[in-house]
Amino acid sequence: MAIDCESRRYAVLQAVHDSEYVEKVYGGYYNVYVEAFGEEGDVWDLFRVYEGDFPELNDLHKYDGFVITGSPSDAYGNDYWILKLCFILRIIVAMEKKLLGICFGHQVLCRALGGRVGKSKTGWDIGFREVHFMKDVGGCYRYLDHHEMSSFLSIIEVHQDEVYEVPEGADVIASSDKTRVEMFAIADNILGIQGHPEYTIDILFNLIDRLLQMDVIQKGLAEDLKCRLESAEADQECWKMICRSFLKGK
């Protein structure tokens, strides 16, 4: 396939198996991420890093940016693919490419750069969460500066791990009453987001059902979550704009 030299090229570093639901409805998580963060004319490649499928080191320069997805795996684990991902991420950072980490991606990016991650001290966070931005953060990071938003945005959360300490030189740019490091950034090329700006409400409902089936959460909690979610809404479109602006360097 011929690629327009003006096109921007990105890579999805997928760290999770496609669920049956996402495969059936969306054709896989790759499509969910591209739909959320891509723009017309972009070229997006997929690497299933959880299967050991990584971009070649000699090809990293071809990309304008990389997105690391969520995952049920622990970012602090020592599986071979997780250790290799950390190694690749450090190379990408040295090349000053755009790196956007989502949930597990946020955590493993932090780990790769010398931060600390682990199990959340307050347990699972599932549902909508208000994420509050630090004062004057927009003036430091352009992708936040020109979006009309309040001091907080609601986002979909599904995680039981969190960032304990950000890497040296990183700024914590948003927090919540549940998780201290909801977002961190380094310069203009690294951004980690604990929540899921790419998720839709139906994906969240399906995840709740799957967690219930696996006995990860109790039936009463699952029913309460669904009831509360029906009367609330996340600011997903604004989150998508933030992520697109970050990847484009706007």
Image: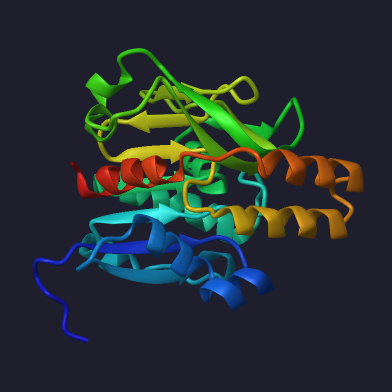
44 lies above or below 36: below
Count the numbered circles shown.
Answer: 0
In the image, what residue occupies the spot 75% across and 26% down? 122
Scheme of colours in the image: rainbow
Q: Quadrant of residue 242?
A: top left
Judged left or right of residue 188, residue 45 is right
Which residue occupies the foreground of this view, 103 or 83? 103
**What x and y, as percent, mark residue 10?**
30, 62
**What x and y, as percent, mark residue 191?**
38, 38
Q: Kindly tell me whether residue 159 is visible in this rendering.
A: no
Judged left or right of residue 5, residue 179 is right
Judged left or right of residue 210, residue 148 is left
Q: Given the current orientation, which residue lies at the most extreme left position?
A: 5
In the image, what residue occupies the spot 22% across and 61% down? 61
**What x and y, as percent, mark residue 51?**
58, 71
In the image, what residue occupies the spot 23% across and 20% down? 139
Judged left or right of residue 125, residue 101 is left
In the image, what residue occupies the spot 40% across and 41% down? 239
**What x and y, as percent, mark residue 162?**
62, 33
Quadrant showing the N terminus? bottom left
Quadrant showing the C terminus? top left
